[in-house]
């Protein structure tokens, strides 16, 4: 099928198109430069056109999510929508059911989401959920930061073995890149403990986070994976943790990048939670300026924000000890899930409220990060969904970024606590994002960071993943009309995925299966076999599952998008 | 005042779901509207007129002018008065599950028994049950830590298990007896039980008040610091009588109060 | 004990098979297969891919008695042909089309259909079942409704501090079984996961662990334990409440609480605090005594409290091999774990209203489909009385009490032996259970049967399959 998306105002930062009125042509799921006369015309005159959104960090599929759904029926009940037309019933607000996740992303004009934490042992489960999510492509990141084998390799600085292990494991569990969550802290949580900072060793293994991060980063670059290491550093949510955050970024400074498809060598995730000053919750302040300053001066770093949206949500992370602390703080039901030899995780419902001073300052810190990092290619739009807020709040975050008026209003009307003025610099920042910057932080830049060359932009040959919003960029003043911004970014006029119209006027009109994006590293087969032979005795002894039954079988990946990487050679 | 009377013609073993027939929704309906209305039964909708004759007398400007009277065997009528905010409903028989659940105002009178979940998550209004009620009266939705938060439930008969589970406000009065774990997980609010209580009232409670005027069979270890109090004033209500007052449930660092009638529960002293 | 000679009379071995009995899902079984022809790859007598066509499992290495007997004596009372009950009340053999068409007609025209079971079949089968349920507005429920349902309610109230079983194996120095007798119900649980195996940090296995059983009965598990706490029946809640109070520093007032001397409780709490890593496994003894879900609720709270001092986790001892799978599957697809009612076009979950037993005792269902479950054997008589009065469709592999209640019988195949599929272990670890031998000739895979029902109901309702499917 051929289409012409006619007369839209196109923002495509990758291809340096900044609000140009032009047609977007696509054929058989790809953007093309010409179509025949039979092409179907979709008139989007003067409307905002962007590539479909790319979410760099969201928790949408996996064992944590299902525990969230299973133990929060009160949350499932909040988002109920009856079945209608092509869509099935939806449930859930902060932890929506899988179909609802797909529909809701689709309605916002998103086409790709990275599932940020997949425990390898339960990777099959994650893939089952990805298959149950329609309409978006999903790239899962396996958790490697507390894996026993990796702790050993890092301790002994065996980077070659580590690289072979990673390469093999990515294929085994069909993962996309390397995720680290509170390195060494997850292992410490196996004993109910945590580590603090980069040099606090994991019990027994006697390896530090500094060593693990460095080793994994080196292995990542050795393999030349399309994404850099994806780091959730230590000390999440602790006042004064910005020092650890900056130290963690510094670790990567001298590690040379080995990939042409991305610019960074480290991606710092939900940086809002890691930019705190002070020593306790009483003297807790924003240290966003320091962290932002570091990022501004170091272009090897990208980050996503994890913006607090001031909702009742469900926090869930592989950072098990942090979740227990949170449970101690709010007393709400605590779920925990420790995975043998690999990782931990925890879940606690959380009510972020503008009346609470800490939550309000956290809200301000997120916005500060957005506004103080100069280069929008280094900061991405996320709410660390559902931790800081559900992903359906992205449009609201966009409206905050585009409207200083709205931010000031919230501070002045006391929609947020007055501590925001005392403990953060937000009130003094009047920067407003324009549509080009919004397109950058929500599509182009995340796609670049993941080495997705086929999406996140509208260049010839890219996937025809396109979002059209009922916003006329040349007429609207986002600063004043922030409500319209929020509304229309939430309900796309069109969401087009692989050349098919999935959403029209904010309604899902077509449901298609999702694709799973994974990385297949080639060229290390003999090293991999040697590594597997060497770990097999330990695997058989300490896992409770047979190696044959550990792997993710092909039937869990019905629609794969395999990213082939030649080990050690920078991809083009 | 508009009086809408439902007279039953036919019963159904599959429950009829009455959640759409609350004063807020039907205050402007005339008889012909009820003739057309199809009521959810199982996975389908069937004409209401097959099951009920509906008489409408008078007129209403607003939902608060509406009184709904239900006659017949209502033991398979679910969700009576669910989410109503005003007006009045009188059910002249025993009713099924969820009567008065999530109601925020108005008044419901049940001249019979009520099944489980009566007054679940109520935020306001008055629910009177002349007979008995079963489990989870005035409770929360499963998984929610916020149960009934306002309004009054008056039970003339006995109450089942886990009365006022996760209560966060409002008042529950039981004239009869009460089964185990009344006021479990409650954080605020007031429960008064005039009859006997089997076991463990106030398990894991963090706040609020429970008064038991009858005899209690077993008390949890988490209730401590017994003291004798005469004619206590609780939440602005003057109560007459001699009570043993406990604080608990300290198993959960609770600071709720449990009052036991001192004469009938001498064995605890 | 009678000594049994090792089985030597077999032709092929199939390794790393998963046991389809209890929630342990032991995935190290070796099936010894006699006869048949290997469809796939054979290496040194081991079938490394594919399955044995026409073979029979004559031996089952590593499995416990429960698992082995299920796998090996599989042909006993096996359902082999579709059947329909005639006017005289006898089940008569028929062909697949007739049976499926009749079942589809019943489902398509039902007002309050209930699809119950699912815990002994694969996730792949559930996909079609859910689609069918959403299409007709049915209630989907599984065995949790009569076993660990209260656990799930408690989890929803109190939280869910769990782990995978390997955490216990590698770390636990204190293992508590409460309200269950693992030695009888999950025979390999102690041996493979919790107590006996030598873990990374517990190199001496059993000797490095303290085993505690809390149970009113002196069970086989209690006999093996270092400590047996035999609290009184129905006293669970009070017992755990006292433990929590002690943990908060309270001096107990009563001398004996729920039949246990207060000193014993204090000692027990102290040793639980001193453990480096504790694991608590609870079973139906907790879920089905007086305070039901509140027993679990308070046990979970106790575990949460203990985590302030040291590390404790718990796992519910799920019964069937995929009972957890159904809960996980329903939650990921529609947000609620079991007892999900699609009657109004969206899922509703309300214990006491949308659960099978409540519906049956209220005599609401007008068509009942049971798949991979045996309500005839397990349900209360009031519920079974209603089942006798309504059309019942059974998808199963064995003749059982439910077959006597059934009006249409559709013979399925045995997951993990004759059909492959996904299951979730009690701790949520997914396992792909492989196929070892072919199924009997005239039976069909569960997946095929339910999909076939779906297609036929779609046809009756005039829906094109591609529109209906996601």
Image (cartoon, coloured by chain):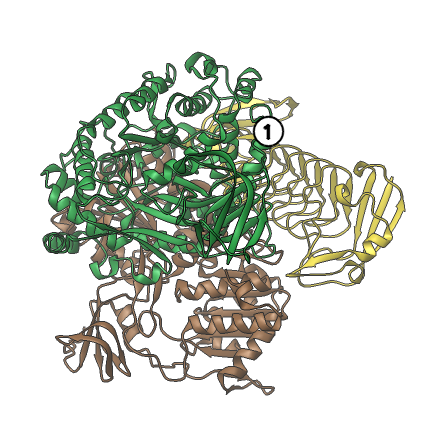
Residue at the outermost right position: B58
What shade has chain C been given?
A: brown
Q: Locate the N terminus of chain C by quadrant.
A: bottom left
Residue C388 visible? The answer is: no
Q: Residue A227: horizontal and vertical position, in percent?
A: 28, 41
Q: Residue C243: horizontal and vertical position, in percent?
A: 35, 37
* Secondary structure of residue under mark 1: loop
Q: Residue B78: horizontal and vertical position, in percent?
A: 67, 52
Q: Which residue position is annotated with label 1?
A: A476
The one of B58 and B11 positioned closer to us in this rendering: B58
Query: Going by the image, does C445 lie left or right of B195?
Result: left
What shade has chain B been given?
A: yellow
The one of C403 and B137 positioned closer to us in this rendering: C403
The one of C3 and C50 positioned closer to us in this rendering: C50
Residue A222 visible? The answer is: yes
Residue drawn at x 60%, y 41% as measured from the top left: A45
Residue drawn at x 42%, y 14% as measured from the top left: A423
What shade has chain A been given?
A: green
User: Looking at the picture, does residue A565 appear above or below residue B14?
Assistant: above
């Amino acid at each position: 099928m051929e289409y012409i998306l006619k007369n839209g105002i196109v923002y495509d930062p990758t291809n340096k198109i900044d609000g140009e009125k032009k047609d977007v042509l696509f054929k058989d799921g790809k953007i093309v430069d010409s179509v025949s006369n039979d092409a179907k015309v979709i008139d989007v005159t003067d409307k905002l056109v962007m590539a479909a959104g790319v979410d760099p960090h969201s928790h949408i599929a996996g064992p944590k999510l299902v525990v969230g759904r299973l133990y929060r029926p009160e949350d499932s009940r909040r988002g109920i929508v009856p079945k209608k037309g092509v869509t099935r019933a939806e449930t859930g607000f902060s932890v929506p059911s899988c179909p609802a996740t797909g529909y809701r992303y689709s309605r916002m004009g998103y086409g790709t989401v990275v599932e940020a934490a997949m425990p390898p042992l339960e990777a099959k489960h994650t893939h089952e959920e990805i298959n149950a999510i329609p309409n978006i492509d999903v790239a899962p990141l396996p958790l490697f930061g507390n894996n026993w084998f990796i702790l050993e390799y890092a301790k002994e600085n065996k980077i070659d073995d580590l690289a072979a292990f990673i390469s093999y494991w990515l294929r085994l569990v069909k993962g996309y890149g390397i995720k680290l969550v509170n390195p060494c802290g997850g292992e410490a949580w196996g004993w109910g403990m945590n580590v603090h900072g980069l040099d606090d060793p994991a019990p027994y293994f006697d390896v530090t986070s500094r060593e693990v991060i460095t080793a994994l980063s080196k292995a990542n670059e050795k393999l030349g994976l399309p994404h850099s290491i994806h780091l959730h550093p230590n000390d999440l949510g602790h006042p004064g943790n910005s020092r650890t955050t900056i130290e963690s970024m510094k670790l990567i400074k001298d590690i040379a990048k080995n990939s042409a498809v991305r610019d960074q060598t480290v991606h710092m995730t939900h940086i809002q939670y890691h930019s705190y000053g002070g020593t306790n919750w009483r003297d807790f302040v924003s240290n966003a300026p320091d962290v932002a300053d570091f990022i501004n001066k170091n272009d090897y770093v990208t980050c996503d924000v994890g913006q607090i949206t001031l909702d009742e949500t469900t926090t869930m992370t592989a950072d098990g000890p942090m979740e227990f602390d949170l449970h101690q703080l709010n007393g709400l039901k605590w779920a925990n899930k420790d995975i043998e030899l690999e990782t931990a995780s925890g879940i606690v419902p959380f009510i972020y409220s503008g009346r609470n001073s800490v939550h309000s300052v956290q809200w301000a810190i997120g916005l500060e990060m957005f506004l103080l990092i100069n280069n929008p290619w280094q900061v991405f739009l996320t709410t660390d969904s559902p931790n800081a807020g559900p992903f359906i709040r992205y449009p609201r975050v966009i409206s905050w970024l585009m409207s200083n008026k709205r931010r000031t209003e919230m501070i002045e009307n006391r929609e947020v606590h007055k501590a925001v003025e005392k403990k953060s610099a937000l009130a003094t920042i009047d920067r407003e994002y324009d549509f080009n910057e919004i397109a950058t932080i929500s599509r182009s830049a995340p796609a670049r960071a993941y080495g997705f060359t086929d999406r996140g932009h509208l260049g010839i040959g890219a996937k025809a993943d396109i979002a059209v919003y009922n916003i006329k960029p040349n007429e609207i003043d986002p600063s004043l009309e922030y409500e319209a911004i929020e509304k229309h970014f939430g309900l796309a006029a069109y969401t087009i995925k692989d050349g098919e119209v999935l959403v029209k006027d904010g309604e899902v009109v077509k449901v298609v299966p999702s694709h799973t994006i994974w990385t297949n590293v080639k060229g290390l087969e003999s090293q991999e076999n040697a590594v597997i032979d060497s770990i097999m005795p330990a695997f058989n002894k300490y896992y409770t599952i047979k190696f044959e039954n550990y792997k993710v079988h092909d039937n869990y990946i019905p629609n794969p998008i395999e990213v082939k990487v030649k080990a050690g050679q920078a991809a083009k | 005042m508009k009086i809408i009377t439902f007279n039953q013609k036919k019963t159904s073993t599959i429950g009829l779901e009455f959640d759409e027939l609350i004063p807020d929704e039907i205050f402007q309906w005339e008889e012909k509207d009820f003739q057309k209305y199809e009521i959810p039964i199982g996975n389908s909708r069937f004409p209401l007129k097959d099951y009920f004759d509906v008489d409408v007398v008078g007129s209403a400007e607003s939902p608060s002018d509406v009184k709904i009277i239900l006659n017949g065997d209502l033991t398979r009528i679910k969700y009576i008065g669910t989410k109503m905010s005003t007006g009045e409903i009188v059910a002249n028989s025993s009713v099924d599950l969820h009567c008065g659940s999530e109601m925020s105002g108005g008044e419901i009178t049940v001249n019979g028994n009520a099944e489980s979940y009566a007054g679940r998550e109520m935020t306001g209004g008055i629910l009177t049950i002349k007979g008995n009620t079963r489990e989870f009266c005035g409770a929360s939705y499963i998984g929610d830590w916020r149960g009934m938060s306002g309004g009054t439930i008056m039970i003339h008969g006995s109450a089942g298990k886990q009365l006022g589970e996760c209560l966060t406000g409002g008042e529950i009065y039981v004239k009869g007896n009460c089964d185990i774990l009344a006021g479990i997980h409650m954080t605020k609010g007031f429960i008064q039980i005039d009859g006997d209580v089997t076991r463990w009232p106030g398990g894991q409670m963090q706040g609020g008040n429970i008064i038991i005027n009858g005899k209690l069979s077993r008390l949890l270890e988490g209730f401590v610091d017994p003291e004798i109090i005469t004619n206590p004033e609780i939440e602005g209500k003057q109560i007459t009588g001699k009570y043993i007052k406990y604080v608990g449930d300290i198993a959960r660092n609770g600071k709720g109060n449990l009052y036991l009638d001192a004469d009938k529960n001498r064995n605890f002293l | 004990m009678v000594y049994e000679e090792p089985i030597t009379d077999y032709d092929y071995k199939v390794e790393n098979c998963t046991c389809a009995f209890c929630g342990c899902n032991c995935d190290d079984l070796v099936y010894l297969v006699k006869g048949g022809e290997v469809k796939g790859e054979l290496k040194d007598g081991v079938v490394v891919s594919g399955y044995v066509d026409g073979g029979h499992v004559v031996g089952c290495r590593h499995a416990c008695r429960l698992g082995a007997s299920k796998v090996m004596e599989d042909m006993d009372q096996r359902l082999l042909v579709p059947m329909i009950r005639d006017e005289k009340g006898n089940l008569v053999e028929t062909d697949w089309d007739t049976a499926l068409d009749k079942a589809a007609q019943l489902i398509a025209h039902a007002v309050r259909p209930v699809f119950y079971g699912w815990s002994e079949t694969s996730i792949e089968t559930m996909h079609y079942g859910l689609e069918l349920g959403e299409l007709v507005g049915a209630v989907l429920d599984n065995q949790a409704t009569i076993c660990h349902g209260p656990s799930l309610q408690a989890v929803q109230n109190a939280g869910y501090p769990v782990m995978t079983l390997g955490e216990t194996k590698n770390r636990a120095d204190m293992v508590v079984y409460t309200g269950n007798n693992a030695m009888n119900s999950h025979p390999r649980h102690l041996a493979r996961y919790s107590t006996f195996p030598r873990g990374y940090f517990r190199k001496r296995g059993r000797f490095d662990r303290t085993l505690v059983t809390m149970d009113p009965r002196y069970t086989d598990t209690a006999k093996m334990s270092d400590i047996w706490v035999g609290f009184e029946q129905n006293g669970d809640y009070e017992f755990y409440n006292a433990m929590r109070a002690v943990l908060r520093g309270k001096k107990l007032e009563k001398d004996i609480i729920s039949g246990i001397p207060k000193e014993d409780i204090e000692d027990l709490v102290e040793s639980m605090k001193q453990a480096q890593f504790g694991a608590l496994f609870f079973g139906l003894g907790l879920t089905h005594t007086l305070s039901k879900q509140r027993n679990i609720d308070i046990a979970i709270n106790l575990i949460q409290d203990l985590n302030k001092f040291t590390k404790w986790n718990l796992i519910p001892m799920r019964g069937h091999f995929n009972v957890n799978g159904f809960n996980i599957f329903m939650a990921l697809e529609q947000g609620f774990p079991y007892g999900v009612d699609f009657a109004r076009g969206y899922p509703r979950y309300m214990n006491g209203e949308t659960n099978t037993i409540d519906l049956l005792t209220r005599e609401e269902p007008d068509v009942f489909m049971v798949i991979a479950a045996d309500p005839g054997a397990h349900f209360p008589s009031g519920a079974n009385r209603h089942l006798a009065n309504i059309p019942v469709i059974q998808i199963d592999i064995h003749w059982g009490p439910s077959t006597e209640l059934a009006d249409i019988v559709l013979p399925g195949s045995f997951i993990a032996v004759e059909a492959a599929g996904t299951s979730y272990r009690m701790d949520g670890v997914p396992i792909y259970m492989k196929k070892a031998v072919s199924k009997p000739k005239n039976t069909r895979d569960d997946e095929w049967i339910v999909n076939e029902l779906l297609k036929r109901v779609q046809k009756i309702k005039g829906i094109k399959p591609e529109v209906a499917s996601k």
